[in-house]
Image (cartoon, rainbow, N blue to C red):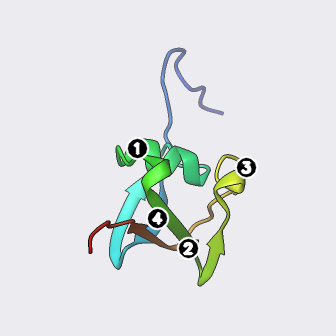
Amino acid sequence: MDRIPSGMRFFVFMKLIVNGEFFETSNAGTITDLLNELSIDPGQVAVEVNLSIIRKSDHSTFRLHEGDKVEIVNFVGGG
């Protein structure tokens, strides 16, 4: 059996659809992780996963899965 050389790293990529675009990540396990990877301020957006709005209080614990459809909507002020 072959051994994996020490110091060698493996990355597991997850494919998501974010705002209608295919997105591949190795870091986004939660919504908070995804927003950080995309450099998005979590206080300025609403997030929907598979047609369900996810409460901000759940962003750090809500686990994303392969193939999830994520919509990130920015709040826009105006009048």
Per the model, the C-alpha gap separating discs 1 and 3 is 16 Å
Q: CA distance from mark 1 to mark 4?
A: 14 Å
Mark earlier in primary sequence (3, 4) = 4
The mark total stands at 4
**Residue 60 versus residue 46 in the image, above or below:** above
Q: Position of residue 23 (x, y in %)?
A: 37, 63
- In the image: residue 56, left or right of residue 39: right
Asked if labels 1 and 2 touch by Cβ distance under 8 angstroms, the answer is no
Task: Check disc 3 and report the residue beneath it.
Answer: 61
**Residue at 57% in and 54% down:** 31
Amino acid at pointer 4: Lys
**Residue 67 shows in this picture:** no
Give, as a three-letter code, the residue at label 2.
Glu
Residue 70, which numbered label? none
Circle 2 — which element? strand
Residue 20 image position (x, y, % from top left): 35, 79
Task: Indicate which disc, 1 or 4, sits on the residue closer to the N terminus.
Answer: 4
**Residue position marked by numbered label 1 in the rendering:** 37
* Residue in the image at 37% along x and 74% along y: 19
**Which of the numbered marks, if any, corresponds to residue 48?**
2
Q: Residue at x 61, y 51 (%)?
A: 30
For the residues labelled 3 and 2, the Cα–Cα distance comes to 14 Å
